Amino acid sequence: MDNRRFIARRAAQYFNEGDTVNLGIGIPSACSDYVDPTIAFQTENGMIGVGPVAKKLAICDTYQNAGGINFVPVMGASAFDTAYSFAVIRSGRMAATVLGALQVAENGDIANWASPGRAFGMGGAMDLCNGARKVIVAMELTTKKGEPKILKKCTYPLTAQGCVNHIVTEHFEIDADACLEAQSLDVNTGNLNFSDIEENYTQANEKLSVTVTNTGDSTVTLKVPKSDYFDVMNEDGSEAVSGAELVKGESLMFMVQPKIGLTKGDYSDTLVFGSEEDAEVVAQVTAEVSVKEAEEQITEITATPEVVNYDDLKEGYDTPDATTVTLTNTGNTVVSLVQPYGEYFNVGELSASELEPGATATFTVAPVAGLETGNYMDSIQIMHTDTEGQEKVLTTVNASVTVSQVEKIYKLSVNPGELDFGKVKAGYDEAPEAQKVTVTNEGNTNVTLKAPSGKNFKTGKLSAEELAPGESCTFKIRPKEGLKAGSYTESIVIDNEQQIKATVKVSFTVKAVRKAKIADPADNKITGISSDGYTTQSKITFTAVGAGMDNESPGKGDVRYVPYNWKVINTNSWSSAPYTAAFGITKAGTYTLTVVFDRQKYNGSEWENTGEQDTKQVNFSITQAQTVTATPTPQPNGATAKSAVKTGDTTNIAPFVIILVIAAGCIAGVVVYKKKKK
C-alpha cells in the first residue's frame, strides 16, 4: 500500500458511526474506501452519499467529487445544488471534514490554498474549516523537496485559524487540539507469551518484562494492574504497587510471571497500566500461559560408555590417559548425583552434580598407579540422592584393567639427529654458537650414559648421566676454533653402559676467502661498426658490450659495467639487455657513435650503480647513395611534363612491368570471351 492510501485509511479511523463527512481532493478523497456503510460522505459540488472511487470497469462520468474524480454513489444518495451544499456545511451539520494542507501550525492554523508564486483558490475549504465539527488534515509529512509541512507557525496565506483537530501523515498522527499537558502511556510490547508449564509446579519457570513509558506532556501517577493469573513485580522481584510517578519521557520496567498454583488449562489476561489522574489514559499488554498435565516422574541416568577396558598395560606402566564417561539425565526430573569412586581406578570429580532433564555431566576413569601383574575390575556405581535424602543406584560403569609382565627394552633417541653449523670463511674469529642435543630414554629400563666427544667438534657436559624410562638429558656441541678451509662431518657417539646405539651427525664448512672480481673499463667496447663506412641508405646495427657482464656468479664486491645510453645525433637509452641498436643517417658525413657505460657493484644480493660512468666512442663515415632518374614520356594534348621523383631506390623494375602487362592481357581476354558468349 502506498503512503497516500495509507494516510487515507488512518484518517478514516476518526469517523464515528452515522457521521456525515466531507472529503477534500487528493489524499482525503480515498478515505471513502476504508469505512463502514453507516458513514455518509458529502461533496461540496452537491451530494451526500458519495461512495468509493470508481474502478476501471465501473467508471461513471455522471458522478464526480469536488476533485473531479469519478465515484460510485451509495444506496440512498441525495444530490442537490452547490448553494444547498454550502448551507449544510455552514450550518454545523458536518461531523467532520478531511482536507489536504500545504502547512499546519502547532496552534491548529491551516494553509492549503496558496504558496509563494502559486495560488489554487480557497474554494470551500474556508467554509469547511469553520463549519465542520472536526477538522482532520491528511497529508504527507514533507514536501517533495523534503521541507516540513508541520511548523511552529504557518508562512503561507492561511485558510483558517486554530481549526485543526487531527493531523495524519505517513509517519505519525497528532491530536492538534490536545492540551499541552495531555497524559499518555505506552508499553514496549503488546503480548507476553510464556512457555508452557506443568501442573503442580512450585515456582514459575519464566519471567518476562514490560516497560511502561510516559509519552505525554505531564507527570503520570501510575496505576499497576492486578491479575488473577499473573504476578506483576518490580525489577527486584518485589510486588509492584500503584502510586509511582512517571515524569514526561520516563520509563519503568516491570516483571510478569504466572501465579503459583494454576491448574491445567490456558490462561490469558489483559494487564492495563493506567493513570490515577485520567481513567482514559491506559497502556495494556496481554499475558498468556498454558498449564499442561504433569508427566509421570521418571528418574533415569544413562552412562556412555558403560564399559571401560585397559587390557594392555605392562608392569611398571605410566598412568594411561583417562577415559571420559558422560552421564545423561534421560528422565524428566532433576537428579542430584553422588560423587562416584573406585578401588582400582581413579575416578575424577563430576563436572556437575545437579542435572536437569536432558542435561549431562562427565567424570574421568583411569587405573591407579603401581598395580602388579594381574586382572582388576571395578563396578563404579552412579547414585543420586532422592527427595527423602536416600542414595539410590541409577546405573553402573564396569571398569577393568589387565597388567602383564614387561620385556626389558633399551632405546635411546637423539634430537636433533643431525646438526649443520653452516658455512664460515677461513680465518673466522669465533666458532658458531653451540647447539643443544637432547637424549631421551625411550625404553623401559634405566640407562647409564658416558660423556660424548668429537675430533673437530667440542662437546659439553651431560646434564644427567642416569636416565630412567622417559627421562631426558642434554649436552651442547660446537665446531672447534681455527679449522682450515674444508668440509667437516662427524658422527658424535653417545656412549652408554648398555651399548645402545645413539649418535648425532654434525657438519661444518669453512670456505676459502673469495677475491672480488673488478672489471676493467678498458674492456668496455662497441662492436658491429664497419670501418669501410656506410651509405645514406644503410641500416647501421651495433652492440655495446660492458666489461664484466659475463660474470654469471657474482660475489659481494664484484664490479661490472652495463651500457646505459648511446648517441650519434640524439641520445637514446637502454632499459635492459640486449644492448643492441640500429639506426640510419640520410646525410653524408663523418659521425661519432658514443656509448656511456654505468659502473655497478654487487652488494651480495643485487647489482647497484656506483654513480661512476665510462664512455667509449667509435667514428664512421656516411657517403651519398647513388640515385636513379626516370625520363618522363611526353604527355598528350599538350600536358605539361614533370620531373621524375628521385627515390634513391635502385631496384630493377623490369620484372614488375612484365607481370603488369601479362595481368592486363588476361583481363582483356576474359572480357572478350564473355562478350562472344552473350
Image: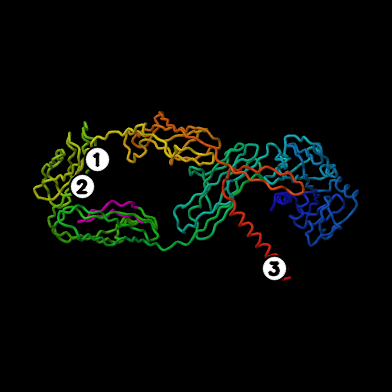
- Estimate the x, y position of residue 71 in percent, counting from the top left: 81, 56
Which labelled disc corresponds to residue 417? 2
Which labelled disc corresponds to residue 503? none
Q: Which residue position is annotated with label 3? A: 673
Viewer-nearest of discs 1 and 2: 1
What is the three-letter code of the residue carrying label 3?
A: Tyr
- Foreground pick, 600 / 210: 600
Indicate which disc, 3 or 1, sits on the residue closer to the N terminus: 1
Vertical relation: 241 (above or below) 48: above
| Label 3: few (<14), some (14–19) or many (≥20) C-alpha neighbours in 10 Å | few
What is the three-letter code of the residue carrying label 1?
A: Gly
Indicate which disc, 2 or 3, sits on the residue closer to the N terminus: 2
Q: Mark 2 and mark 3: span between their CA atoms? A: 98 Å
- Estimate the x, y position of residue 592 in percent, counting from the top left: 48, 32
Q: Which residue position is annotated with label 1? A: 422
Q: Secondary structure at mark 3?
A: helix
- Estimate the x, y position of residue 630 in percent, counting from the top left: 63, 45
Tags 1 and 2 in contact by the CB under 8 Å rule? no
| Label 1: few (<14), some (14–19) or many (≥20) C-alpha neighbours in 10 Å | few
Q: Secondary structure at mark 1?
A: strand
Magenta residues, as a range?
Answer: 335-353
The furthest residue to the left:
497
Indicate which disc, 1 or 2, sits on the residue closer to the N terminus: 2
- Foreground pick, 346 / 614: 614
